[in-house]
Image (cartoon, rainbow, N blue to C red):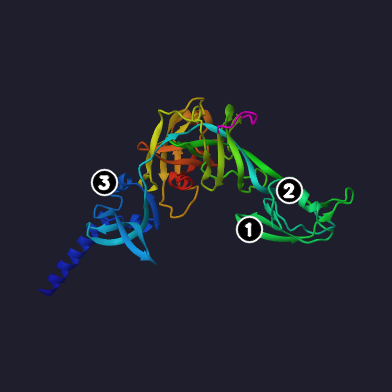
Amino acid sequence: MKSYIFKFFGLLIAIMYVIFALNINYSAVAQMPNNLSITLNDLGEMNDKNTFGSFVSANVAEDTYTVGKERKHNTYIQLKLFGIIPIRNVEATIYEEQKVYLGGIPLGFAINSKGLIVIGQKKENGKRNPFKSGDIITKIDDNVIEKPSDAIEYLSNLEVNTPITITVLRGGEEKYIVVIPNIDEESGEKKLGLWVRDDAQGIGTLTFVTKDGKFGALGHAICDYETGAEIPVKDGGIYICNIVGINKAQKGKAGELRCLFSLSKTPYGEVDINTKSGVFGSTENKDGLVDKNLSAEIGSRMIVKLGKAKLVSSVSGIRQEYDIEIIKTKYQPSQSDKSFVFRVIDKNLISLTGGIVQGMSGSPIIQNGKLIGAVTHVFINDATKGYGIYVDWMMQEIR
């Protein structure tokens, strides 16, 4: 008799295990980021689609606590089993639904750097120069350096053999280099033995413009073309580009949009920041940048799914939607410009460009009518495949 009871309970436990396994998405629960920005509509959509399984729901909760005499609120998303048993809390920022105008057109970017970009150096008297290509000089001693003439003027007023401390950005971190300027044998001027520049230009695609004129583009940083250094922005502008040709992508070789823009024209907007999530700024002139009939709501990364989506681009000369397929996603708890992988399946786009080409970075990606990301990188060995960045990371730079 006891053996039958044990078998019965064993069978019951096995059945319960199968039921739970089929109705709880353990992987989705575990991979939830520790903090999240999301709208209430997106949260409702996640529940409707049983993102965490049919037994688990996600709801907004709030704690109130006191720090000194100040009362503060902590908002989080609470995952509950059967809507009753809490199984995980995730810090959250709940933001209102927001519609933006979709981009899709190529832009020219002209940026003046906040500092001097080291692009080359020479040995003085056989000594190794402590600077590296890509270093960005921001200060000499306590003096801010914004252009080459600032450095030249400061060095000219130094006494011979005076050591100076130079602040550089290297890989996003500040470094301090102590050197004694060299004396040029011909001119007698004090020099650092460096070749530098203080500006950068690039081509990319506009992703969106908000109703109040803030824009996001590119989906990744503009970097110096020789050194790969990410450019800190002093100021800059965006310009409408004319596509004069397309070098189609081939296996093992990236294609590119051939575009022209003129710095003699008035810029369409100002560049404020250049980040790992893209280039951001503001514009007072949306005409020519966006089609005011083409807008979409912002979609959280939590609602991005495998399957069909659309890429918006004007590589054909007019703004069009092209079919793509999202083939890999992850919740991505930390910022990255490689958030998901997609494949171009639109024959017209493949015929025109071969897939994704340089200059298309920033092209908006929409799924189920919402802007969920932008193109950032192409697979060199297969130009029909590329990476996209979640629009979450881009919106964080302008909210």
Regarding residue 6, the answer to whether it shows in the image is yes
Image height of 69 relative to 393, above or below: below
Question: Which segment is the magenta one?
Answer: 261-268
Q: Measure how far apart labels 2 and 3 are at the Cα level.
A: 60 Å
Image position of 238 (left or right of 292): right
Q: Residue at x 69, y 48 (%)?
A: 116
Compared across the picture, whether 140 is left or right of 342 comes to: right
Q: Position of residue 65 (x, y in %)?
A: 34, 64
**Quarter of image, res 78:** bottom left
Foreground residue, 239 or 164? 164
- The residue pinned by badge 3 equals 48
Under circle 3, the secondary element is helix
Give the amino acid at mark 1: Glu
Q: Out of 144 and 173, give the one closest to the viewer.
A: 144
Q: Indicate whether 347 appears above or below 61.
A: above
Asked whether the residues under the numbered discs 2 and 3 touch, taking CB atoms below 8 Å apart as contact, a structural biologist would say no
Farthest residue, direction front: 69
